[in-house]
Amino acid sequence: MNIIIHIKNLRLKAVFGVNDWERESKQDVVINVELEFDGTDAVKTDSVEHTVDYHTLTEKIVTAVEQSEFYLLESLANHVLHIVMQDQRVKKARVEVDKPQALELADSVSVSCSAERL
């Protein structure tokens, strides 16, 4: 049985951007994660040991993002995706990183990336 976990609108601050003024202080970033895994054992046992622990995963993402200093959103998104895929139970995942107020006329700019185990 495939289970999909969503971590929605994780609001963090990180240093990123290509301009010097962007790198002077941490900026807002919004991260969304979607991951899929075989949840058969989790459903049968009702035990956290058989699922992808989204609390622990979120802690890892928060620590990594808040300590990062990437230039590109693409690099930040890929870094978060790598963290998600470290759990071998994850069959596939998608990460979206939003930079609010990146453009004057838009709510945000976002980049997404995905991976799947073969």
Image (cartoon, grey):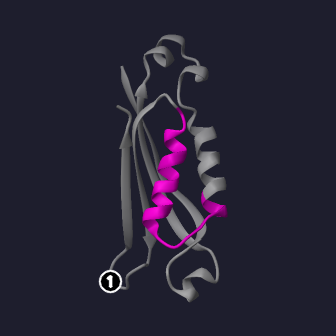
- SS at badge 1: loop
User: Quarter-wise, where is residue 46 in the image?
Assistant: top right
Looking at this view, is 8 or 116 the one in front? Answer: 116
**Label 1 packing within 10 angstroms: few (<14), some (14-19), many (20+):** few
Name the side, left or right, on which 79 lies relative to 66: left
- Up/down of 117 relative to 41, above or below: below
**The residue positioned farthest toward the top in the image shown:** 44
Estimate the x, y position of residue 97 in percent, counting from the top left: 44, 61
Q: Which quadrant does the C terminus fall into?
A: top left
Q: Amino acid at mark 1?
A: Leu
Image position, residue 28 (x, y; %): 55, 70
Residue drawn 53% across the image and 31% down it: 52
**Residue 106 placement, left or right of 35:** left
- Residue 75 image position (x, y, % from top left): 47, 63
The residue lying at 38 percent from left, 66 percent from top is 110
Name the residue: 37% across, 57% down: 112
Q: Which region is colored magenta?
A: 65-87
Horizontal and vertical percent for residue 29?
Answer: 51, 66
Q: Quadrant of the N terminus?
A: top left
Majority secondary structure in the magenta region:
helix
Residue that carries the numbered disc 1 in the rendered image: 105
Asked if 67 appears above or below 54 in the picture, the reply is below
